Amino acid sequence: MDYPPTKLDYHVDMFKLQSQARFLSLLKAEDGRTALILDSTVFHPQGGGQPSDTGFIQFAGSDFKFSVQDVRSKDGIVLHYGVFQGSNPEDVEKGQQVHLLVDEPRRKLNSRLHSAGHLLDLCMQKVGLGHLEPGKGYHFPDGPFVEYKGVVPQAELQVKQKELEVEANELISKGGKVYAAILPYEEASVLCGGSLPDYIPKGSTPRVLRLGENPGCPCGGTHVSDISDIISMKITQMRTKKGMTKVFYTIAS
């Protein structure tokens, strides 16, 4: 797609729920869905184990209203999928100003689930499982989990599961500010314990997340403003299979 990369407003302020942008194009996807491309967005696309935001895009000076049902990113371009409400979308002009409004309850839930997944990484270290390497996370409401490379002896699983839950809720009760910032590579490396994952190119400016004063980690998602906003956490299952350990969790509603 011949468009400049979409500016990600939520990277600058992950608590932002509204923004202004310029409409660039309307596309029809192969599956028949309508997608809007804007010069910037406050909508978080699905990725990093986090589901996408939903909400509305209102066109200035008209009754065009676009219901955003799904958001994806491809080659740096954010695609807002959904349906128009009101007038004929063929009349939409390139360059028109739009107002973006994110669904707040969904954003907050997604942010809490995502933050809880990162909190688990800290707790794994505190209960003596820091040698396990964090892998993919699934921070969707229907069954969130974090997967780690490495195994926990079967006889220790139940004990470690209980220890993780206690440690997680202690950290939540203490609270601590949550920060996310785009930093120079070397500075980001220091905040992340002295090194960054190999998939982050040297010389780049990664976005780093910090939960309180704990070591940071690279992350492009949205999160809570304070660890205490997670409210509480329950470790529902912990299992080891084929050299991987999965930790399933839920958070308070």
Image (spheres, grey):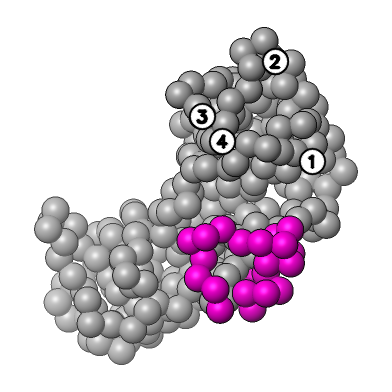
Which quadrant of the view contains residue 30? bottom left
Q: Earlier in the sequence, mark 2 or mark 1?
A: 2
Q: Amino acid at mark 3?
A: Met
Q: Earlier in the sequence, mark 1 or mark 4?
A: 4
Circle 1 crowding by C-alpha within 10 Å: few under 14, some 14–19, many from 20: many
Query: Where does label 1 land, which residue?
Result: 172
Residue beneath the point at 37% across and 79% down: 5
The span picked out in magenta is 178-203
Q: Is residue 111 above or below residue 125?
A: below
Q: Nearer the viewer, mark 1 or mark 4?
A: 4
Within the image, what quadrant is residue 62 found in? Answer: bottom left
Query: Alpha-carbon distance for marks 2 and 4?
Result: 16 Å
Q: Are marks 3 and 4 in contact (CB under 8 Å)?
A: yes
Could you say which disc has been placed on residue 156 in the image? Answer: 2
Mark before the other along the chain sequence, 2 or 3 = 2
Instruction: Pinpoint residue 7: horizontal percent, then vertical percent.
Output: 45, 78
Q: Which residue is mark 4?
A: 148
How many neighbours does mark 2 have within 10 angstroms: few (below 14), some (14-19), or many (20 or more)? few
Q: Residues within 10 Å of mark 3 (few under 14, many from 20)?
A: some
User: Which of pointers 3 and 1 indicates the residue nearer the eye?
Assistant: 3
SS class of the residue under badge 3? Answer: strand
* Image vertical order of residue 32 relative to residue 98, above or below: above
Q: Is residue 155 left or right of residue 135?
A: right
Residue 226 in view here? no
Q: Mark 2 and 4 residues: CB-CB less than 8 Å, in contact?
A: no
Kindly report which numbered mark, 2 or 1, lies closer to the viewer in this rendering. 2
N-terminal-most mark, 2 or 4: 4
Structural crowding at the residue carrying mark 4, measured as other residues with C-alpha within 10 Å and reported as few (<14), some (14–19) or many (≥20) = many
Q: Is residue 214 visible?
A: yes
- Residue, disc 3: 244
